[in-house]
Amino acid sequence: MLADPSFAQFSQEIGLASLGAPDTEIEKFATLYWFTVEFGLCKQNGEVRAYGAGLLSSYGELQHALSDKPEQRVFDPENAAVQPYQDQDYQDVYYVAETFDDAKEKFRNYVAQHLKRSYEVRYDPFTQSVQVLDSVEKLQTLSDSLQNEIVRLASAIKKLSMQ
C-alpha cells in the first residue's frame, strides 16, 4: 500500500503531525496510525474493504476483520485515538471509514483541532528533509515554489487539452 501515493502521503501526514507534539498526542497519533494505516477499513460500493497494510499482509487477520466476530465502528478519530488495542492477536475493534478519502479528511480535521503548535511542518521531497515553517520568509519561499508548480501544472493541462 505504501507504493500508492495517496496512502503513502497519509502515512507521512500522521508522522509529520507527531513532530513537536506532546507525548499524549504522539500516543494518540500512534493509535490512529494503528487503526488506519495498519488496520483500517473503509467502504467501497457499500461493502467493507480493507486498506490497512497490516490487514492486507495477514490473510487470517483480514478474514477476521471482515467477519461478524469483531466490532466494526464508524471511523471517528476522537474515539479511535483512545481505543485500547493489542498487537499479539486479532483486533476486537476495527474502524470503518465511508471512504479512504473520508478517513484522511477526518484525520486532518482531528489534527487541526488538537495539535497546538506555533508552526507547521512539511516534507521536502527534493532535499528529503522536514521543513519547519515558522517564519514569513520560509512561507514566502514555499509559496514561490508552489506557484512555480502551479504554472507547470496549468501548462501541462493546456497542452493536454490541445491534443
Image (cartoon, rainbow, N blue to C red):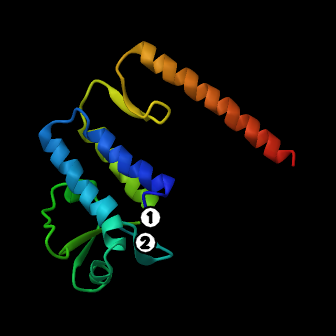
Q: Is residue 7 left or right of residue 90?
A: right
Residue at image position (72%, 36%) is: 154
Residue at image position (12%, 43%) is: 24
Q: Is residue 85 left or right of residue 96?
A: left
Q: Is residue 28 above or below residue 57?
A: above
- Evaluate if marks 2 and 1 touch, with contact meaning CB atoms under 8 Å apart: yes
Q: Residues within 10 Å of mark 2 (few under 14, many from 20)?
A: some
| Residue 85 spot, x, y in % from top left | 14, 65
Q: What is the secondary structure assignment of the residue under circle 1?
A: loop
For the image, the number of numbered tags is 2
**Amino acid bearing label 1:** Thr
Q: Residues within 10 Å of mark 1 (few under 14, many from 20)?
A: some
Disc number placed over residue 43 in the picture, else none: 2
Closer to us: 47 or 143 = 143
**Amino acid bearing label 2:** Lys
Residue furthest bottom in the image: 68
Q: Is residue 77 above or below residue 118?
A: below
User: Could you tell me if residue 96 is visible in this image?
Assistant: no
| Residue 34 spot, x, y in % from top left | 25, 60
Closer to us: 60 or 140 = 60
Closer to us: 93 or 34 = 34
Closer to us: 38 or 82 = 38
Could you say which quadrant of the image residue 48 lies in? Answer: bottom left
Quarter of the N terminus within the rendering: bottom left
Q: Is residue 14 above or below residue 126?
A: below
User: Could you tell me if residue 130 is visible in this image?
Assistant: yes
Q: Which residue is mark 1?
A: 99
Query: Mark 2 to mark 1: distance in Å?
Result: 5 Å
| Residue 125 spot, x, y in % from top left | 47, 36
Could you say which quadrant of the image residue 122 lies in? Answer: top left
Q: Is residue 107 left or right of residue 1?
A: left
